[in-house]
Image (cartoon, rainbow, N blue to C red):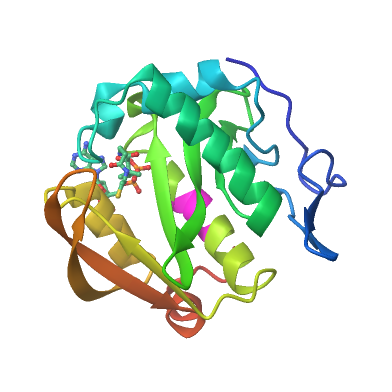
Amino acid sequence: MYRAWLEPGAASADIGTVPLGAGAVTVEPLVSAGLATAVAWSADDFELAWGLWGDPEVTRLMGGPFSEEYVRERLAREIETLRSVGIQYWPCFLLATGEHVGCCGLRRYKNAFAFGFHLRPEHWGHGLAGEAARRVLAHAFSTLAASTLFAGHHPRNDPSRRLLGKLGFKFSYEEIYPPTGLLQPWYSLTSEDFESVRPKTC
Ligand SMILES: CC(C)(COP(=O)(O)OP(=O)(O)OC[C@H]1O[C@@H](n2cnc3c(N)ncnc32)[C@H](O)[C@@H]1OP(=O)(O)O)[C@@H](O)C(=O)NCCC(=O)NCCS
């Protein structure tokens, strides 16, 4: 599925300025060498959302398979959190082809933000989640001035565990994840931890 995106260095377009209370939050295009995440989810994106969260392989360790109704609710929730809080699991597209890769972003978690990534299976194992993650995390610590971010994963999700470790996340505690009903590990990341592991070119 093709989707328009912003070229690196271009001015922000429709992701641009998100009303937040009396002020406004500018969400910068999260553009890097291979990926573009410059466009927010829109209400017209059900086909893209279903291609991702409707795929049982993607959601196998996230509490899936999910129904069409659930995916519609999830899409609506992403749109709402961008409007109200200035965050979402931004959709990611390949810069070269416009192909939808998945999403990576933030959601509200307790009094902080939780971080996560969901990729379509054909894009696993190419380092794309890490590339998107470094952009989102840099955005969270700089533009959004987050102090600590949290992330959790299914106890058997080894790719997620390995990648969170490479991004600097440190194990913090275990907690039941309601969609799976399982005790899952949770990790935290400070901006200092992130800076200490991130490539200086990012
Ligand atoms: C978890 C996920 C985001 C990883 O994305 P990715 O772009 O494939 O990650 P990377 O290519 O950086 O790979 C991360 C690590 O996992 C390994 N890996 C990737 N795919 C793997 C697979 N299918 N099986 C085993 N290991 C795998 C990689 O080798 C790499 O380890 P290494 O750096 O030590 O070699 C992706 O697999 C995904 O979206 N899965 C489905 C949704 C999901 O589970 N999201 C996380 C919810 S907590």
Q: Nearer the viewer, residue 139 or 177?
A: 177
- Residue 171 in picture, x, y percent from top left: 23, 74
Q: Quadrant of residue 176?
A: bottom left
Residue at image point 67% right, 38% down: 40
Dominant SS in magenta: helix
Residue at image point 58% right, 31% down: 94
Decide if residue 70 is on the left or right side of residue 172: right
Q: Nearer the viewer, residue 19 or 126?
A: 19
Indicate whether 108 appears above or below 70: below
Verify whether residue 133 appears in magenta: yes
- Residue 122 in picture, x, y percent from top left: 36, 24
- Answer whether residue 114 is visible to the viewer in this image: yes
Residue at image point 44% right, 20% down: 50
Indicate whether 177 appears above or below 62: below
**Which image quarter is the N terminus in?**
top right
Verify whether residue 4 appears in magenta: no
Residue furthest out toward the bottom = 192
Quadrant hosting ligand 1: top left
- Answer whether residue 32 is visible to the viewer in this image: no
Decide if residue 71 is on the left or right side of residue 125: right
**Which range of residues does the magenta coloring cover?**
130-134
**Which image quarter is the C terminus in?**
bottom right
Q: Quadrant of residue 59?
A: top left
Residue furthest out toward the right = 11
- Residue 156 in picture, x, y percent from top left: 11, 48
| Picture mark count | 0
- Residue 125 in picture, x, y percent from top left: 31, 38
